[in-house]
Amino acid sequence: MKAIRTFCRKHLRLAVVMAMVLSVTLLTASAEGGSEVTLDMSSINSAMSTGLSQIVTQAISLLSLILPFVISFFGVKWLCVKGIAWFKQMAK
């Protein structure tokens, strides 16, 4: 119970600030549309779809760039560990 109280005390300011920012954002969004508040879900869906597909494309290109270095690093590390074990076995 004490841990929950300290967590709430520690993060109360952040929660209040986030609630204030969210309320101001919603007020601004609703004021822009005039008296009628309408959301164009098709544009939101297309924006999310485009953004996520770009993230996936960039992640794949980053992995294809980094993967050879990572494989080489772990290969050299594995060879060093096995080499040390081999030399210790030979020294017995």
Image (tube, rainbow, N blue to C red):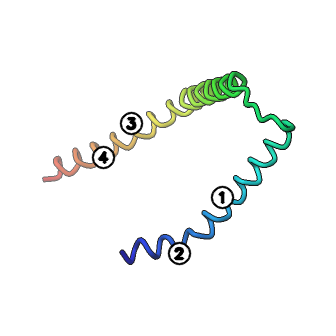
Nearest to N terminus: mark 1 or mark 4:
1
Q: Which residue is mark 1?
A: 19
**Which amino acid is tagged 4?**
Val
- Residue 4, image x and y in percent? 42, 71
Where is residue 72, by image quadrant? top left
- Comparing 35 with 3, the one in front is 35
Where is residue 54, by image quadrant? top right
| Image-based side of 82 in relation to 25, left or right | left
Q: Residue at x 71, y 60 (%)?
A: 20
Q: Residue at x 87, y 37 (%)?
A: 34
- Cα gap from disc 1 to disc 4, whole angstroms: 53 Å
Label number found at residue 75: 3
| Image-based side of 44 in relation to 85, left or right | right
Q: Which residue is mark 2?
A: 9
- Residue 69, image x and y in percent? 51, 35
* 42 shown above or below 28: above
Q: Residue furthest left?
A: 92
**Which amino acid is tagged 1?**
Ala
